[in-house]
Image (cartoon, rainbow, N blue to C red):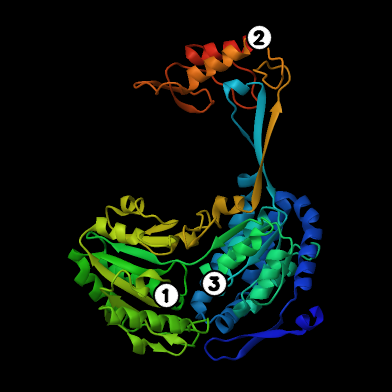
Amino acid sequence: MAAQAAEAKFESRNPATDEVVGTFAVMSADEVAAAVRSARSARSAWQAAGFAGRRAALLRWAAWLAAHEHEIVDLVHAENGKPAIAARLELLLTCEHIRWAARNARPVLRERRVRTTALMIDYAARVGYLPYGVVGVIGPWNYPLLTPTGSLAYALAAGNTVVFKPSELTSALGLLLVEGFTAANPELPDGVLVGVTGGGETGTALCRAGVDKIAFTGSGATARKVLATCAATLTPVVAECGGKDAAIVAEDADIAAAARMVAWGAASNAGQTCAGVERVYVVAGVRDAFLTELGRQLADVRPGSDPQAAYGPMTMPGQADVVRRHVADALARGGSALLGGPQAVRGRFVDPIVLVDVPEDSAAVQEETFGPTMTVRTVADVDEAVALANDSRYGLGAAVFSRARGGEIAGRLDAGMVSVNSVLSFAAIPALPFGGRGESGFGRIHGADGLREFARPRSVAARRPGVRGLDVTRFDPYPGTSAVLRAALRVRHRGAPTTGSTTGTTMDGATGTTAGSVTGTTAGSPAGTMAGGAAGRLLRRVRAARR
């Protein structure tokens, strides 16, 4: 049975021409398990390379990808459908994220000291981060380089080895990422980064193959299947699913800039962007000006198969049907088409569609469309816009356009990421974490949080010889211990902080406000003194209990 499964093949095809781009094996559960074993065997060598060795390997990977720019751009256009400029931008951002992960893993994940409290003055404390071991990455097709690299590079930088299953629609690009890493680092053992190919069954096999964590990007429906499979072995998952991102256009917005960016945020990549703009809420006072400018921006924008087209076809077969259904429902429910309409869906190519005054409970507003469409609703004020933007099962990204209130409005949005006077800018800044809430998934990729997503914290409390503290790890406590515990409760936790207190050092050793000036003790420092106030009296009681 396994031999038969190994012989099964599938093809990736050019979404514009339906020409075959590549043929790949549908890998069996046994083959996936072998890939995981290979990754596990390489784990020790990869971890032994340390931060410096992993940094060098990752930077060589980015250099290899940059050196093969033309080949990669052509393959992205052929297998995914993106025009050349979009493919080149995706490649650049991919290299930027690899570089950031490589250069920042050590400062983010290295062991560091943390402060103790007066009650634990005889201890030093530190926290470090350990790699999970083997991470399985299940990638998407819409950004087949950038999105999986947000997991691959960060997991590798944290010291994990990785087994990567790209989308069956873009398997050639996924295997090219693996090939590039291997070619750039011939001295590394096999298994640091391994590729496996196939469809949903291969992804399920990866979840069951004993990996230590799964990073998944895809639909909410598939995410639920991944979570159910991983639950059987308590395998942790970071999931980046869909979005229904809203843009808010305030009365003081730069209308020309807002319309231009919203148009691009909705239609670029044929709208196949999880954090793209799908809903727009525009304040009544600028509605007409915004719609006029939006129509002007999109009037001549058309998809095509040419590398120089504005955007390409729908990559996934059947996605155009979702667009068609959402548009039909919106129009049947009383909405109108400012631009496009049912006739805009031309096979795998979909022209920009702008739907106006669509009911909030329609499919076009509630469900992810994943096409070059947007709904525009007029609101009385920013308060109404914020309420409607937040009223969604999704919570991935958002955009705000306002000259004076952008930051304040952004702070009120219940989304994982917000761009102010731009769209999607957060995805191009590697230091910013990427992720959402609700139907958009959980966990984070990118940034320091993305590095920590692929590492397990380890806490260490080490007793410091020669420093007297409160010892409660005995059945015959020192005389006065009970009194010290009562005093600690009274001093530290009864009553509210007084007003007008001075800035000093708290009992936890962190800068804050306290009624008296206290000199605290940091982890690993000499015992120090705590003079004056209740904190000082408590510390003297702690020491007295040990005499």
Q: Is residue 217 visible?
A: no
Mark 1 residue crowding within 10 angstroms, few (<14) / some (14–19) / many (20+): many
Residue 2 appears at what percent x and percent y?
Answer: 80, 78
- State which quadrant residue 249 falls in: bottom left
Q: Earlier in the sequence, mark 3 or mark 2?
A: 3
**287 sits to left or right of 163:** left
Report, in whole angstroms, how far the alpha carbon at label 2 lies from the one at label 1.
70 Å
Q: Residue at x 44, y 80 (%)?
A: 322
Image position of 483 with respect to 522: above or below: above
Q: CA distance from mark 1 to mark 3?
A: 17 Å
User: Nearer the viewer's eye, disc 3 or disc 2?
Assistant: 2
Picture coordinates of residue 304, whole percent (x, y):
45, 87
Which residue, given by chain and number where applicable, does mark 2 sit on?
Answer: 479
Report the residue marked by disc 1.
369
Q: Is residue 42 left or right of residue 335?
A: right
Query: Which dot, 1 or 3, sits closer to the camera?
Result: 1
Of the pair 40 and 55, the residue shown nearer to us: 40
Query: Residue 273: image x %, image y %?
Result: 47, 71
Give me the C-alpha separation between circle 3 and circle 2.
66 Å
**For mark 3, what is the residue?**
143
Circle 1 SS class: loop
Of the pair 315 and 216, the residue shown nearer to us = 216
Q: Amino acid at mark 3?
A: Tyr
Q: Secondary structure at mark 2?
A: loop
Of callouts 2 and 1, which one flags the residue occurring earlier in the amino acid sequence?
Answer: 1
Q: Which quarter of the picture shows residue 258?
A: bottom left
Residue positioned 37% across, 74% down in the render: 363
Residue in the picture at 36% in, 74% down:
364
Label 3 neighbour load within 10 Å: few <14, some 14-19, many 20+:
many
Mark 1 or 3, nearer chain start = 3
